[in-house]
Amino acid sequence: MGTNYYVKDAPPCPTCKQGGTEIHLGKSSGGWAFHFQYNGGEYYKTIVEMREWLRSKQIWNEYEEKVSFDEFWDLVEAKQEEFEESKKHWDEHPGNTFYIDGYCFSDHEFC
């Protein structure tokens, strides 16, 4: 079980839960390092670029809960600190994952 995180250009409608454009950032799963979605490099190509890009964005989890920039990065960094003990995505799915600045990314669709 895990939780996906997204950037949304507007808060979801309280009635139908639908919002505007949604960009998948990645997934936090128990026992795994945070798994980022690369999105073809369209929005960021490094962690530094991603952090800058996210500063002005609204981050939401798949349960339609807004997550602050700091909360999101605290989660990512906590998962990264557990990295040596966590399962490694690239071991489970060789060829589908890669590193950027020591963080796990994929450029294929996952949920």
Image: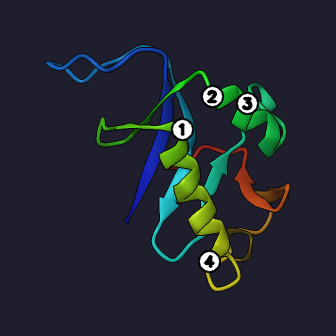
Q: Residue at x 35, y 19 (%)?
A: 11
| Element on which disc 3 rests | helix
Tell me the tag on residue 55.
2
Q: Nearer the viewer, mark 4 or mark 1?
A: 1
- Quarter of the image with the N terminus is bottom left
Q: Residue at x 56, y 72 (%)?
A: 32
Q: Picture coordinates of residue 85 (x, y %)?
A: 64, 86
Q: Which residue is mark 4?
A: 82
Mark 1 or mark 3: whose residue is earlier in sequence: 3
Q: Earlier in the sequence, mark 2 or mark 4?
A: 2
* Disc 1 residue type (three-letter): Phe
> Disc 2 vs disc 1: Cβ atoms closer than 8 Å?
yes
Count residues near mark 3 (Cα–Cα under 10 Å), then give few for <14, some for 14-19, many for 20+: few
Q: Which mark is on residue 52? A: 3
Secondary structure beneath label 1: helix
Q: Mark 1 and mark 3: span between their CA atoms?
A: 10 Å
* 3 and 4 marks in contact (CB < 8 Å): no
Whether 86 is drawn above or below 6: the answer is below
Residue type at numbered disc 4: Glu
Where in the figure is residue 40, as x and y percent of width and height? 77, 33
Quadrant of the image occupied by residue 90: bottom right
Mark 2 in CB contact with mark 4 (< 8 angstroms): no
- The amino acid type found where label 2 is placed reads Arg
Q: Which residue is mark 1?
A: 69
Image height check: is 42 above or below 68?
Answer: above
Q: Are marks 3 and 2 in contact (CB under 8 Å)?
A: yes
Q: Is residue 97 above or below residue 38?
A: below
- On the picture, is 8 further left or further right than 83? left
Mark 2 vs mark 4: give the one in front: 2
